[in-house]
Amino acid sequence: MKSVSDPAVLRREIRAGRFTGPTTGHAGGYLQGNLAVLPAALAGDFLAYCTRNPKPCPLLGVSEPGSGAIPALGADLDLRTDVPLYRVFSPAGRRERVADVRGDWRDDLVAFVLGCSFSFEESLQRAGIPLRHLAAGRNVPMYISDIATRAAGPFGGPMVVSMRGFSPADAIRAIVLSERHPLAHGAPVHIGDPARIGITDLAAPDFGDPPVLEPGDIPVFWACGVTPQVALRAAEPEIAITHEPGCMLVTDLPAEGASIGLNAA
Amino acid sequence: MKSVSDPAVLRREIRAGRFTGPTTGHAGGYLQGNLAVLPAALAGDFLAYCTRNPKPCPLLGVSEPGSGAIPALGADLDLRTDVPLYRVFSPAGRRERVADVRGDWRDDLVAFVLGCSFSFEESLQRAGIPLRHLAAGRNVPMYISDIATRAAGPFGGPMVVSMRGFSPADAIRAIVLSERHPLAHGAPVHIGDPARIGITDLAAPDFGDPPVLEPGDIPVFWACGVTPQVALRAAEPEIAITHEPGCMLVTDLPAEGASIGLNAA
């Protein structure tokens, strides 16, 4: 699919059902977000959980209860139609690859949009730093680490981390560049020995594809947006809506210069 | 010795012969520099060498031929008296721990002041990152790597690197913080396996003291200000004056916010 550069145009294509796939590689230079929708009764605890764990859960925006809008992320943005594919967990069961969740929306639902790794990966690519999983056409490997997140109400549990391998010189540059993207998980949480953060077999990730490493590579681990998804599932809300992995909410926030706390509407 | 916080006061004490030791821990928040003085005939090549190798040779200032002043580094500053201890290499032989080089100064000498690691070490300490060599009362270990510098005229040769060991989490923070200090060698040049940059025995540094490493530490290597000293010596100038290691030129430049190219006078 030809790359769509304007985020509002991309959202309109998604809303019309003409764009139904992963958003990576589209709307370059704009932040994309993970979506987490849950009942208002749990929203205060989930907000606290994100605030206490800004690396895995960088908060881009929160909706008013029942609203599908977060104007600060895009004037026209509709959270119920503008994600290419959703997952719905409800009393009626689990549904995957849902294109539109207007029929599932309730007056008590609150939506959270959390930053994802796409914008820091873009920054590395612009700097000429190879991303081996992308070159191999794979998803990034993700692992359940033994780093505990800071709990809030029913939300807690381990931090999920993504791993990318680099030459030592590129690892240094990747650390420096990613630190400049606090809304895209920021600086890594670990480098080197996977066992130090409870990962016993690097070849067997808990999510995503097996890693691509070259001789002499240093494994670099970032906090991952799957962390709040795991915390959300463990809290067993009556209803929850998330995005399909890779099919993100595209926002109007520029990847450079947006700051935590300035964008939440 | 009680810490002297004002750089001009410290220079006055040094000039008067009342302060004759290492400058580390004094004039916190201000850049300190390595001194390299050589004949004007070599100055153009040495300037080019520094410009081509900004990580080991971050240029803080250059004097006019014959002048002992670099006003941009301190209005009162006198390069011939304001370093606690000098080394002089001249046709008359090598002299160490010289307190005053006014008698050695010539109309054709040009002085270069190059940034040193003190200000980034200060930044790490303020962030609560342990510096193991300082805690152990040792000098930092330095190694002749197999990373080649970019040559200019008679100046060239290998990059000398300093090594500090950190826990993985502190290594990430040290990389991020040091990158913000381009006049103090900036981000590291290597992390991890010493053999990758030609260091066969980490326990046996070429300069400084043996390393202090704790289990699980990641070795982090920075470009070192000894690099231009080695290049200078190899070029065999008729006369050269440098500082004794640790006894630096204290400047009025703030450690935060000074930039390469804005300070050279």
Image: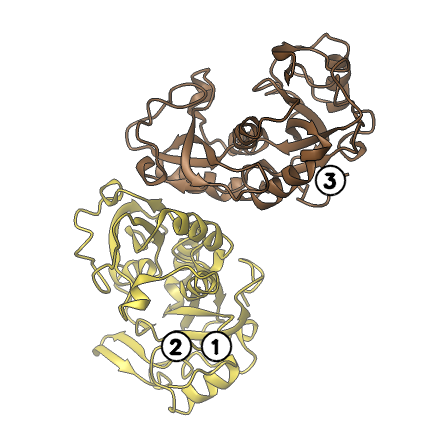
Chain colours: A brown, B yellow
Figure quadrant of the N terminus of chain B: bottom left
Q: Which mark is residue B23?
A: 2
* Secondary structure of the residue carrying numbered label 1: loop
The amino acid sitting under disc 3 is Ala
Q: Residue furthest top?
A: A18
Instruction: Tell whether label 1 touches label 2 (CB within 8 Å).
Output: yes
Can you give x and y, in whole percent of width and height, for residue B200 in the image? 17, 46
Can you give x and y, in whole percent of width and height, for residue B121 in the image? 41, 63
Looking at the image, can residue B150 be seen?
no
Check the image and report above or below for A163 versus B15. Answer: above
At a point 40% along the width and 41% down the height, the residue shown is A190
Mark toward the viewer: 2 or 3:
3
Whether labels 1 and 3 share one chain: no
User: 10 Å neighbourhood of mark 1: few (<14), some, or many (≥20)?
Assistant: many
At a point 47% along the width and 81% down the height, the residue shown is B78
Whether labels 2 and 3 share one chain: no
Judging from the image, mark 3 belongs to the subunit labelled A
Total count of labels: 3
Spatial CA span between label 2 and label 1: 8 Å
Check the image and report above or below for B137 versus A72. Answer: below
Mark toward the viewer: 1 or 3:
3
Of residues B104 and A104, the one drawn nearer to the viewer in this rendering = A104
The amino acid sitting under disc 1 is Ala
The amino acid sitting under disc 2 is Thr
Spatial CA span between label 1 and label 3: 42 Å
* Secondary structure of the residue carrying numbered label 3: loop
Residue under numbered circle 1: B27
Residue under numbered circle 3: A264
* Secondary structure of the residue carrying numbered label 2: loop
Of residues A215 and B67, the one drawn nearer to the viewer in this rendering = A215
User: 10 Å neighbourhood of mark 3: few (<14), some, or many (≥20)?
Assistant: some
User: 10 Å neighbourhood of mark 2: few (<14), some, or many (≥20)?
Assistant: many
